[in-house]
Image: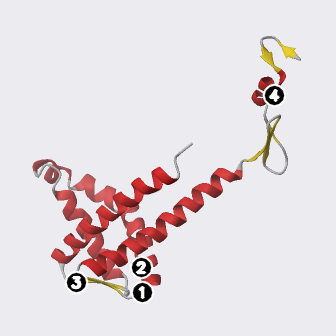
Amino acid sequence: MKIGNFHRETACLWQARITRGGFVQSQAGFRTVSARRYATGMKTLIRWFLLAAALLLVAHLYSGVAVTSFSSALIAALVLGLLNTLLRPILVLLTLPVTVITLGLFLFVINALMFWFAANMLPGLHVTGFSAALIGSLIYSLCGMVIDVAMERLFPSP
């Protein structure tokens, strides 16, 4: 049956509604609203585990960084993520003139400071000095970029 210029199926797809259970109901079938939240949470957990494995890889590749166990790497990855989310933007803003003068190279120093600060806070992550923190943060950043590209290719955004 036609409704205007559209078939009934097309019209039903536009008239989706949310039921009590959190489902979006349409003629084509059921789709959960919480499925996107679940997928986002799973991607976050996978990324967290991969970043912890990247910390273990940094410790394996460079002798200036040591991680005692995978659980220590998980905690360190979480703390590094929190530091980079909360403290790093403030430091970038405060050191903006120096960053502009050095053409952005000072951002490597900020990354190294975050890495070194996390190592001083956590008993399971050891860094021998600032130069080790600089090299370790560079390797960790490269691993993080590879992980982000792989996650985007494996789980594309809708």
Give the left or right position of residue 142, taking residue 147 as reference. left
Report helix, strand or loop for mark 3: loop
**Which amino acid type is marked by label 2?**
Ala
| Residue at x-position 30% and y-position 63% | 141
- Dot 4, crowdedness within 10 Å: few (<14), some or many (≥20)? some
**Which quarter of the figure has residue 82?**
bottom left
Q: Which residue is mark 4?
A: 12
Q: Is residue 155 above or below residue 9?
A: below
User: Can you tell which of label 2 and label 4 is closer to the viewer?
Assistant: 4
Task: Confirm or deny contact between disc 1 and disc 3 (CB under 8 A).
Answer: no
Q: Residue at x 40, y 76 (%)?
A: 76
The local secondary structure at tag 4 comes to helix
Label 1, label 3: how many angstroms apart (C-alpha)? Answer: 15 Å
The reply to whether the C-beta atoms of the residues labelled 1 and 2 are less than 8 Å apart is yes
* Tag 1 residue: 69
Left or right: residue 76 compared with residue 106: right
The residue tagged 3 is 63
Mark 1 vs mark 4, CA separation in Å:
54 Å
Closer to the chain start, of discs 1 and 3, is 3
Q: Amino acid at mark 4?
A: Cys
Q: Which mark is residue 73?
A: 2
Q: Residue 137's x, y, as percent?
A: 26, 69
The N terminus sits in image quarter: top right
Disc 1 from disc 2: Cα separation = 6 Å
CB-based contact (under 8 Å), mark 2 and mark 4: no
Going by the numbered disc 1, the residue's amino acid type is Ser
2 or 4: tag closer to the N-terminus: 4
